[in-house]
Amino acid sequence: MKLLGALQQALGDQLVLTGERIPTKARSDSSHTGHHLPMIYIRPCSVEEISKALRVCNSYRNPVVVQGGMTGLAGGANPDPNDVVIAMDLLSGVEEIDTAAGTMTVLAGTILEVAQKAAEEAGFLLPIDLGARGSCQIGGNLATNAGGIRVISHGVTRDNVLGLEAVLADGTVISSLNRMQKNNTGYDLKQLFIGSEGTLGVITRAVLKLKPFPVHRATALCGLNSYEDVVALLRQARKSLTGLSAFELMWETFFRFSCQAEGFEIFEADYPFIVIIEQSGETVGLEEFLSAMFEEGLISDALIAQSEKERGRFWKIREGLSLGALPRLIEYDVSLPIGVLDLYAKEVTAALETEYPGVHVSVFGHVADSNIHLCISAGPIDASAEHRINTIVYERVRQHRGSISAEHGIGTLKRDYLIYSRSPEELEVMRRIKQVLDPRCILNPGRVI
């Protein structure tokens, strides 16, 4: 095979794997929808090696799929049998922490938690934070513009990036490793690659913003009786609590399932809505705030974590890892105006229960930034039934003028529904950008558009 020989000549046999040397994890991301190993699996150790690999693949017009921590849920990292995979795990490490500027320069294959700990050791907080922090990689976080639990105070991933380096399909390295907050010199090229899911270039380095590490942190779990109370509580928390860093909502079905699976007993009564409020830095006033919310009738019950262990217990419930034990779990990630989130959840749940009696529907998410997750298990279903569930979930997103993907990306699994959230004119502009940067369409083909 000419392509294999050219890659081996450019990179050496140790970095170019085939056959039984390809790890089984290369089949699929965490959606478990991938079924094939790639033809060739490359593990580059440097930006130069990525550039060489892409130059060769581009000359042979061979599709390339980029793989990071494989924590995605949209099928974006799933290869076909004739694909070349570029795995980013060896391109790893924190290269510099600038304590004066409050920035971190990091390689794309670095595990998020590794970068977080390096920042903490230097006295800083890396604002990007996800439940998959122990296995997801910085490059994947940027490529999908991941959200996470700190968006209310620090924004999504793209809001925490100052500079970026990426390799184009033809091997050209675009190094725009800006370290300044202000740099108004033409097009902000990094934003092209953030959220592009590897379809425009392979992200290799980034300069990330750091924040002072919060010395204090207070976390409360609150039970509420109506969604209107949830929205009112959020409004009051934003107005009254300094350092508000998280406001996470769990609907009762999800909260009860997660508590039972973890063996936790939290509240004596059941509440339709449970909120986690977290305050970082200046934590004076949380108890007084909750007392005032009791008096106004917005909160029916509340607990303030008295230790890091108890705080961890609150967040373990919210992370909902126990849902993975449900049969044929399908996970959705949507964004809608805050005022209709509960209405949307009720509409989808009612429609699913009508067509699939006994279906499990868990709803939770980052209500403060309009993003909720739905985890649906209807037992053993075929492709036709899964398509019908997709339609129920996404059709109602379109009706409420929301987004079919808030933070997980489009990949291959949501591509056919992208028209529900983006106009034909927007999609055409995306295609034009793709054509300019990747004219032979070798980078993650079939993803997004």
Image (spheres, grey):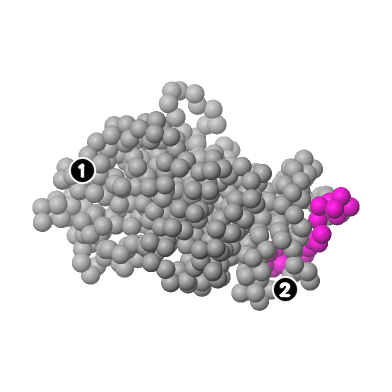
Relative side of 149 to 42, left or right: right
Instruction: Tell me whether the residue at label 1 lies in contact with that at label 2, contact meaning CB atoms closer than 8 angstroms.
Output: no
Relative side of 19 to 372, left or right: left
Q: Position of residue 161 (x, y in %)?
A: 50, 39
Q: Could one spot residue 392 in this view of the protein? A: yes
Relative depth, front residue between 240 and 251:
251
Task: Please give the residue where the numbered disc 2 appears in the rendered image.
Answer: 265
Q: Report the residue at 24% width, 49% height from top.
A: 63
Quadrant of the rendered image containing residue 4: bottom left
Residue 58, disc:
1
Q: Report the residue at 51% width, 73% height from top.
A: 325
Q: Which residues are drawn in magenta?
A: 292-315
What amino acid is labelled 2 in the image? Glu
Q: Position of residue 335 (x, y in %)?
A: 55, 46
Tag 2: Cα neighbours inside 10 Å, few (<14), some, or many (≥20)?
few
Real-space Cα separation, disc 1 to disc 2, in angstroms:
57 Å
Q: Report the residue at 45% width, 69% height from top.
A: 328
Relative side of 91 to 286, left or right: left
Taking the view exactly as shown, the residue that stands out farthest to the front is 354
Relative depth, front residue between 233 and 306:
233
Taking the view exactly as shown, the residue that stands out farthest to the right is 295
Q: Secondary structure at mark 2?
A: loop
Q: Position of residue 302 (x, y in %)?
A: 79, 61
Quadrant of the rendered image containing residue 137: bottom left
What amino acid is labelled 1 in the image? Asn
Q: Could one spot residue 173 in this view of the protein? A: no
Q: Report the residue at 54% width, 69% height from top.
A: 357
Tag 1: Cα neighbours inside 10 Å, few (<14), some, or many (≥20)?
many
